[in-house]
Amino acid sequence: MTKEVPLVVIVGKTNVGKSTLFNRLSGRRITIVDSTPGVTRDIIENMIEIDGIQIRLVDTAGMKLNSSPDDPLQSEAERRVWEVINDADCILLVLDGSKEITSIDLGLIDRLRRTKETIIPVVNKREGMTHLSLLSDFYAFGFDDVLQISAIHGDGIPQLKTILFNRLRSADESKDVPVIEHHDFRIAIVGKPNVGKSTLFNMLLESDRSLVSTIPGTTRDPLESSLISGGYGRYRLVDTAGLVRKSRVKEDVAFYATVRTMEKIAEANLCVLVLDVQEGITQQDRNIATQIYQQKKCCLAFLNKMDLIPERLTRKKIEETKKWIWNELNFLNFASILIGSATDRNLKPYFLAQFAAIASRYYQRLQTSFINRVIKEKINDFNISMGKGRSLRVYYGYQELNAPPRFSFLTNFKGNDRELERSIRTIEKIIRQEGDWEGVPLSIELKNK
């Protein structure tokens, strides 16, 4: 084993989502994913990078722990899994969060603990439920961290990467590991008056920095503070005054508060748009969302005051609510979404994970070879119409900028503004399907050949 590159091994019983997690962490589909148990038998390895740390990531066969002479392939596969486990620096133990703990899980946990110290339990299949409590069985083993994720949708993956980064870094402090802290990444909390912006600001800072009142317009001057969050990075957090309709801006104080808020939106990299679940999405919410969209800012929409709603928040309800927000603010359909209450301090890790994930996407850059090998071909296969029987053809593409991301394509485009807008929307959809850009705006320019 090459000790310079840490080895991280994904283990678990059959059909818990190990290969899906392997593909998610790899950023591309490498292993076959199917609902049939036992699809993965081989030891599959890929080199990945998390915040500057190179990692050998290994996907393994599903464990049954009951070797049978009738299934020699399974027996051999499990023997090889234990061999690679012995060399591992860290184990990602994948459990099925949609079911109760089984005897195979218990046996695997017991044997792993006798073999390895660095084990991270990862509870998968928690789509839309990563903020809800798990069954107590998952916490009964005394692990330091029990992560909830959805490997198929990406929920909880940023938090998993952060914990994995910290574990590997602390295991070898002698190495000079670069830490991406995003010191200059500015986050503005915005919204109309009295939706809970200051409460959220205080909760994230764990202090009463901002005055909280039910009186609209309590916050006038933007408040800024450094948000230091350990492995999640360091950010500049801004609480802003509530933006009211122009017709209501009559006093000088309200006018200047609005001006300063608009300045903070312009300076921000990420806007947290706070919405009030009791009021629904109003025209003023849409006006603020328009400002975020037009200024090409990253966006995290937070539906606040869910504690005042008696209805139980089920997974189905969460997904329905997200779709409702995306539909109401359709031009911000790239936004990340969190649902809860700003008074709930248990939500802070989920905000921090979202901040870290959005910041990473904001700075990421796609390789030109990938753009021309995959994205360009998919655009051309789509046959985007330019009218008069003509289709858009892309000859070459590249990512011109990051922070925020901007793509340029050399094409045969000849059409009006409406056709240009439609073509760009289609291309953006394809780019988002081929990469993780949630929460981040994309700019696309079509250039004539």
Image (spheres, rainbow, N blue to C red):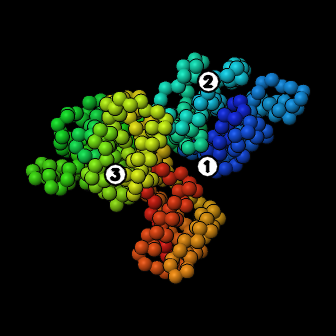
Q: Looking at the image, which residue sits at the far front?
A: 311
Residue type at the position of mark 3 = Ala
At horizontal 39% and vertical 57% (from top left) the residue drawn is 331
Residue 100 is marked as 2
Circle 3 is placed at which residue position?
268
Rounded to the nearest angstrom, the CA distance separating label 3 from label 1 is: 28 Å
Disc on the earlier residue, 3 or 1: 1
Residue type at the position of mark 2 = Glu
Query: Split into 4 quadrants, where in the image is the N terminus?
Result: top right
At horizontal 90% and vertical 27% (from top left) the residue drawn is 69
Does any portion of residue 96 appear in the rendered image?
A: yes
At horizontal 61% and vertical 24% (from top left) the residue drawn is 100
Q: Residues within 10 Å of mark 1 (few under 14, many from 20)?
A: few
Closer to the eye: label 3 or 1 = 1
Circle 1 is placed at which residue position?
27
Secondary-structure class at tag 1:
loop
